[in-house]
Amino acid sequence: MKVKHKFGWFIAIYAGFTALLILVSVFLLWYQLTLHEKDLFKNVFSPYALYIITAVVFIIAGFGLIVEWMFRAYIAPIRKLPGEVALVFSANPSHRIGIEGSLDFKRLVEQINAGAEHYEALQKNVSQQIDTAMAELAKERNILAAMMAELPEGILICNRDGQIILYNTQAKRFFNEQVVMLKGEPGNNDDGGGPSGYEEKRFLGIGRSVFGLIDRNVIQHALDEMHVHLDRNEENVASSFVLTAKGNRLLRGRTVPVLTSHREFSGFIIIFYDITQGLRSEARAEFLLQSFQNRIRHSTTSIKSAIGIMLEYPNMDPSRKARLTEIIQNESKALGHLIQNSAEEALLQNKKEWPLVPVLADDLIEAFRKKAMTILGVELILEKGGGDGRVRADTYSMLLILLFMLERVVRTTDGEKYFCGFSTTDRFVHIDISWEGSAVKLGQLRKWENQELQIEREGLPLYFKEVLDHHEAEVWPHYNRELGGRACLRLYLPAFKSSTEDTNRIAAVLPEERPEFYNFDLFNQPGQNPDLDDCLLADLPYTVFDTETTGLDPSGGDRIISIAAVRIVKLRMLSEERFDHLINPERDIPAETTKIHGINADMVRAKPRIDRILPMFYQFVADTILIAHNAAFDMRMLQIYEEQTKIKFSNPVLDTLLLSAVIHPAHDNHNIRDIADRLGVDIIGRHTAIGDATTTALLFLKMIPLLGNMGIYTLKEAREASQKTYYARLKF
Amino acid sequence: MSHQILIVDDEPNIVVPLQFLMEQNGYSVIVAQSGEEALEAVSKYRPALVLLDIMLPGIDGFEVCEIVRLNPEWKDIKIIFLTAKGRNVDIAKGMVLGADEYITKPFSNKQIVDSVKRLLEE
């Protein structure tokens, strides 16, 4: 019952009881009087009855006004005060008490607000010092995180119970939102259900179990093997396995333990290597070898057999002889093709190990000019006008080729000025080094071929010819009238015309804020299956979600059109791990609700239906506590789809509306905006599912310490306190 | 009456010399280019010997061999694998399936003629 109502009832009962006493007294007095006295009384008061009644009404009204004033001036403000004071000294130090009341009460509030100013200033000072120290730590941590993120291997670090406490970008690419086919029906843990299967999307995230991501048997086997190695005190304690990941990637996983200083097992690291390409190459090479062998065997058999017959039966029928000759010719030709194709294929295979990237000839010769100056001290004059030449090259080794040539030219010829330019044809980009002086002879070029690519202090342990061959390039003396009689060496590089971009790695960017890929506090998680009710609120993983709907009447046919969620693990909102989907409700969206959430029929027409989204959401919220504002409504909405999707959400639920009523029972308003104002939280994207879910998550994080102030620490305590509030009785 | 030999191979350039060789040695020859054709020919002509390639379109040579050996009526038919599959494991597999001989390509004409004669004289 609200305080105002409670006070009203108290006064009403008090006034009623007083009135009853007065009436009883008057009644008793009346019976004591004689008839004469009664007449006398009537005669005296009858003419003034109206005045007397009016006076009584005024007295009652005056009494009511005084009571109302007392309530507003003393009772209501005092009831609100503890909550407001707790707010200032816990969740929102910037909050100032603005409760109206009597003069005495206002003085009290002024004193408290002055104390709050002082407290806020002190807290800011301490916070600044902490922030400075934390910034230094964060910088180092972020460098480490950025490095982790850019590793080509996927990395998962888990605590001893298999909860993920760190993952990097590559692991996210390998596993996040991986779709697997399972037997049975969604929401039913029994995999051995009927013959019908369903798709399940698996999410990678901090605090989630690795066993929900990768087949439990595989990981368990690796862990068992690792423990055996540890027990034997072996040096190599790693255990390896192979598994498939998103996009049919084949990964090799390598599990290594994380030990405490006392060699106690505290978790494990799994490193994933993408072996798809390697295996494909190996398989391709094996296939090529097999085909090559088979083809050779076939052809030689035919040739050998045909020749043998022709020798053994020289007088055979001429038509048969012609047929055998044809076989020999065809098979010889096939062998020739086979050898040529296999050689090209093998060359292509080798190139994958030494990748060439597309580069503009312009950029290449500009880099060459700079290096010629810094390394050789030679001023190269660039001749422009080569067009849009593009080649595939390993730029460093190609630059060494050019520098190698220039250095030898300078050393062996009597040139004075040196020029560089390029021209393009359909098939080649020609890079010319020219000079006014004697030409380089072919014999000299041949000598260079077997020399190592060494110039001054730079070089590679590769031969000149080897690098040219890898680029399918050639160097040749060139004579061109356009060069005005200059001597020239021309480098022929195959022109590159493909428009497809190579998959280059993007530069690692140090994040300004802590990347939310890890949370080392999870090492101290009490257990994989703890008794949730007795768990501290601060230790539990949460999914904070919100739905936008076609209306407010689930039973009357209103449906979800948007669902979004964010996760909270160890009191940190993981905004990286979010769920945000529009849903086709397969019905109209009333214009009045579109005004609220901004979603119209056009926006959801091409979106998936609820039976596609809800199974994903079910996976996303697995093993977490659900949080929503006015959760009864959202849960009712989810429940509507139970029969259709066979998905039942059995996660424990907390409601920020009820928790707010627990924390601030004296306040009448517990909508998101009012709570956000009270707790000093900025509202993000109000009335979008993801915006409301994010704001609700921030509110919930602010509420946890306030609940602690009230002695509410565990999930059970929070739920029981919620159930006692007035709002818990609202139904949808 | 001359023995009938079934040559099963999808490579005409191998079949032509083999056919000529067998005919020159007094055998009559039937040719099949796939596993299915081979089984049809076995059923229809009951040849004395099958020269069987392994890599065939459709049913492969191993399977043809298995089907022939599982039929008691065809137990007397000799089978020689003539194949480019030269790995030890392939040879072992062929022998386990009941082949009488396993000859890897490239083979000599003499080798093949000798094997056929030996098996048919047994």
Image (cartoon, rainbow, N blue to C red):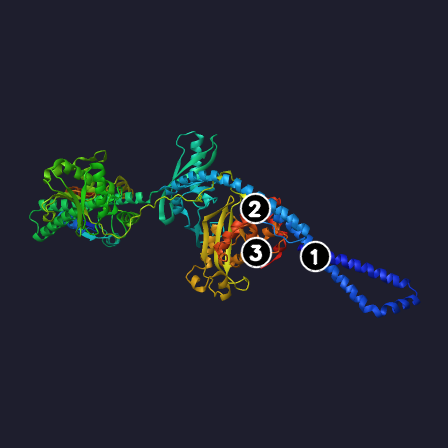
Q: Residue furthest left?
A: A315
State which chain disc 2 sits on: A
Q: Residue at x 84, y 70 (%)?
A: A47
Question: Callout 3: few (<14), some (14-19), or many (20+) C-alpha neighbours within 10 Å?
Answer: few
Residue that badge 1 annotates: A69
Q: Residue furthest bottom?
A: A47
Q: How many marks?
A: 3
Q: Secondary structure at mark 1?
A: helix
State which chain disc 1 sits on: A
Q: Is residue A669 left or right of residue A502?
A: right
State if disc 2 and disc 3 touch (CB < 8 Å): no
Q: Secondary structure at mark 2?
A: loop
Q: Residue at x 7, y 52 (%)?
A: A318
Dividing the picture into quarters, in which one does residue A515 lie?
top left
Counting residues from the N terminus, which is met first, the one under dot 3 or under dot 2? 2
Label 1 – label 2 distance at C-alpha = 31 Å
